Image: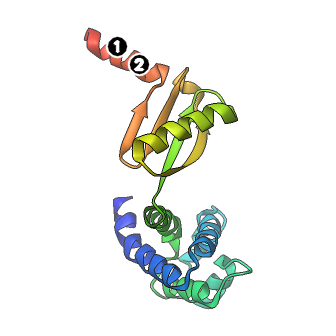
């Protein structure tokens, strides 16, 4: 996976630079996200490297209907360089660059059960105080956590789950 990230990084930076210069950050986010979902589809992924699929056909397959000429040109560049399978990584790196430029921290809150809007708002407010910037929160549910939540924001992971507490207790007891 690290090789894919390394290969995707310059393309994500290029897409971000184009979008920023044109004032189209949100539009590029949507276009890249859609193209990435299509490229990651198990029915489409094997086609992307197939020699019988022309670059123009690949662009038509992956480009959203409302894609701008710049977005289509970007997909054509990826196709010409054999990098279309990297679209999920490119889209993720692009979102990281966009979040940094807009001073937004992206966090994932994984809880044992679905969180209410009030609980999510409390977590968001606490994260905004901690990071000193706006926070976009994505939710996930993992019943294996037993209780509590795990919050992941960039390099910061806050494990407040019951499973994590039991693991730390077990470790402390030397079992």
Q: Residue 45 at what x, y percent from top left?
A: 59, 68
Q: Pick whichever, 18 or 145, lies toward us.
A: 18
> Which residue is tagged 2?
165
SS of the residue under disc 1: helix
Distance from Cα at disc 2 to Cα at disc 1: 6 Å
Residue found at the far right of this picture: 65
SS of the residue under disc 2: helix
> Which residue is tagged 1?
169
Q: Residue 105 at what x, y percent from top left?
A: 47, 52
> Is any atom of residue 141 visible in this view?
no
Q: Image point 58% across, 69% down: which residue? A: 29
For disc 2, the neighbor class at 10 Å (few under 14, some 14 to 19, many from 20) is some
For disc 1, the neighbor class at 10 Å (few under 14, some 14 to 19, many from 20) is few
Q: Are marks 2 and 1 in contact (CB under 8 Å)?
A: yes
Q: Quadrant of the N terminus?
A: bottom left
Q: Pick whichever, 16 or 20, lies toward us.
A: 20
Tell me if 33 is positioned left or right of 129 in this view.
right
User: Which of the labelled discs sits on residue 97, or is there none?
Assistant: none
Q: Image point 58% across, 88% down: which residue? A: 70
Q: Is residue 171 above or below residue 110?
A: above
């Amino acid at each position: 996976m690290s090789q894919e990230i390394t290969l995707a990084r310059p393309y994500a930076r290029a897409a971000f630079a184009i979008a920023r210069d044109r004032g189209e950050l949100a539009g590029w986010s949507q276009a890249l996200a859609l193209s990435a979902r299509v490229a990651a589809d198990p029915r489409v992924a094997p086609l992307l490297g197939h020699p019988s699929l022309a670059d123009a056909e690949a662009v038509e397959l992956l480009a959203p209907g409302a894609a701008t000429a710049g977005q289509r040109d970007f997909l054509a560049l990826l196709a010409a360089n054999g990098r279309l399978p990297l679209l999920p990584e490119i889209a993720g790196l692009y979102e990281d660059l966009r979040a940094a430029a807009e001073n937004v921290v992206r966090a994932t809150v994984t809880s044992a059960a679905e969180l209410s809007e009030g609980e999510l708002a409390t977590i968001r407010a606490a994260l905004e105080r901690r990071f000193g910037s706006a926070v976009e929160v994505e939710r996930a549910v993992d019943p294996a956590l037993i209780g509590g939540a795990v919050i992941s924001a960039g390099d910061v992971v806050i494990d407040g789950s019951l499973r994590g507490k039991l693991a730390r207790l077990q470790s402390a007891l030397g079992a």
